[in-house]
Amino acid sequence: MSARDADVVVVGGGNAAMVAALTAADAGARVLLLERAPAHFRGGNSRHTRNIRCAHDTGDEYTTGPYPFAELRADLCGVGEGPSDEHLVELTIRQSVDVPAWMTAHGARWQPALTGTLNLARTNRFFLGGGKALLNSYYRTAERAGVAIAYDTKVTHLEVDGEICTAVHTYDGRRVRASSVICASGGFEADLDWLGRYWGEAAEGFHVRGPAYNDGGILRELLDAGAGQAGEERGFHAVAVDARSPKYDGGIATRIDSIPFGIVVNRDGRRFYDEGEDIWPKRYAIWGRNIALQPGQIAYALWDAKVQGAFLPPMYGTCSAPTVEGLAESLGLEKRAVAETVAAFNTAVDRGAAPQPDFTMAAPDGRATVGLDPPKSNWAQRLDTPPYHAVPMRPGITFTYLGVAVTEQARVRRTDGGAFRNVFAAGEIMSGNILSTGYLAGFGMTIGTVWGRIAGREAARHALR
């Protein structure tokens, strides 16, 4: 297939891009996919994923029970400030129901539900081998379907004439023409200068969980061409990651999961947020923003020997000491401040309800502190059993929410009130239509898959009509 006579050009190489390419190919379109990364780094942020959250009325061998539309919608509305566009949220959830079957038909393989402290066994389905294996399966399926794939191909310019994208330009001087263009190239989280417009110098303290390729180049091209905006400028999906991890592409392995099991202090040795607000899938993604708002964009998770080993261990090990003061000193913190914080926390735990026989993270347990600001609403137990452990944490940015506005057909809207006739978007580049300030574990893959299918179907329909 000549790049000059493609029906559909897909810009990007992650989950949303692959789903769009496969859907367009299923519809009979000739598809060219332009992936900026080399083949061994293909897949963008999707390489680091491991599950997807879809509505389902019954459990099966991969989920432990039903997760109906109304519950998923309520969960999504309960994180952050709720969804950006309720109509598009409902569309996304309804179309998520048959996503697992579609994924299986296109090469996805699954593993049985996980148990433990993640609280996802009923709501989320896990990919066998994780996101990397899923993407590899999709790429193999795409190759069999005749999708042409160009690696190491950075798109530098979208040639736009009014409501039509007439060509896509690449770094090596190629001018690629297609009847439809699907933009599925991620957010701008790897451009720290762009993040700095909204976060100032704090952005320099951010880590980027995915590849350095996600610099928002295509988003910038679309906005410059008159695309409408969706999503909060400061909005992002960010978690607490190990401060010792790489600046880019650390992925899921660098995430810190110990927060609900102890307390978190800033560089002044003071607590600043409720570590027990809710179960992990609904609250883990607030901690990137929490830390981003602290002095120096750094914080420290502290816990004691009672819970050591009860959660996924930090990739780089822990700092440990026989005393709280010694632990603070090893972290470079003022030991008196940390000791006072721990003592005040322990006293507030003592004022709370009597501890239950077994400490469990299976559900909120109501073990709350009393007379402490901020409180710990659940799983509050004394830090009093040496050795004491800690890890330093930074904000780990997964993806940004500022993107392009889309119609129900995934067409990119324009600032003049219309929409581009042949430009579609899917995945993180349009996630701001769905997400505002919060995040629900696994839902990014849901957005990418649902909207990748919509974009692929509509782009092929436009190209083949």
Image (spheres, rainbow, N blue to C red):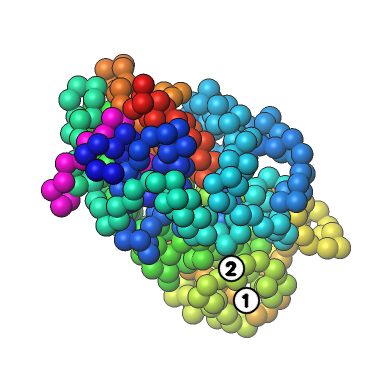
Toward which corner of the image does residue 70 lie, by quadrant? top right
Residue 291 shows in this picture: no
For the residues marked 1 and 2, what is the alpha-carbon distance in whole angstroms? 7 Å
In which quarter of the view is residue 355 placed?
Answer: bottom right
Q: Secondary structure at mark 1?
A: strand
Residue 64: x percent and y percent?
77, 49
Q: Residues within 10 Å of mark 1 (few under 14, many from 20)?
A: many
Q: Which residues are magenta?
A: 171-186
- Please state which amino acid type lies under the numbered disc 1: Tyr
What residue is drawn where x is 72% and y is 48%?
63
Q: State which tag comes first along the sequence, 1 or 2.
A: 2
List the single residue furthest toward the left: 173
Horizontally, is 107 left or right of 44 in the view? Answer: right
Query: Is 235 contained in the magenta span?
Result: no
Q: Which residue is mark 2?
A: 302
Q: Is residue 55 above or below residue 62?
A: above
Q: Residues within 10 Å of mark 2 (few under 14, many from 20)?
A: many
Q: Which residue is mark 1?
A: 388
In percent of width and height, residue 430 lies at 40, 35
Q: Amino acid at mark 2?
A: Leu
- Quarter of the picture containing the N terminus is top left
Residue 173 magenta-highlighted: yes
Q: Residue at x 58, y 41 (%)?
A: 102
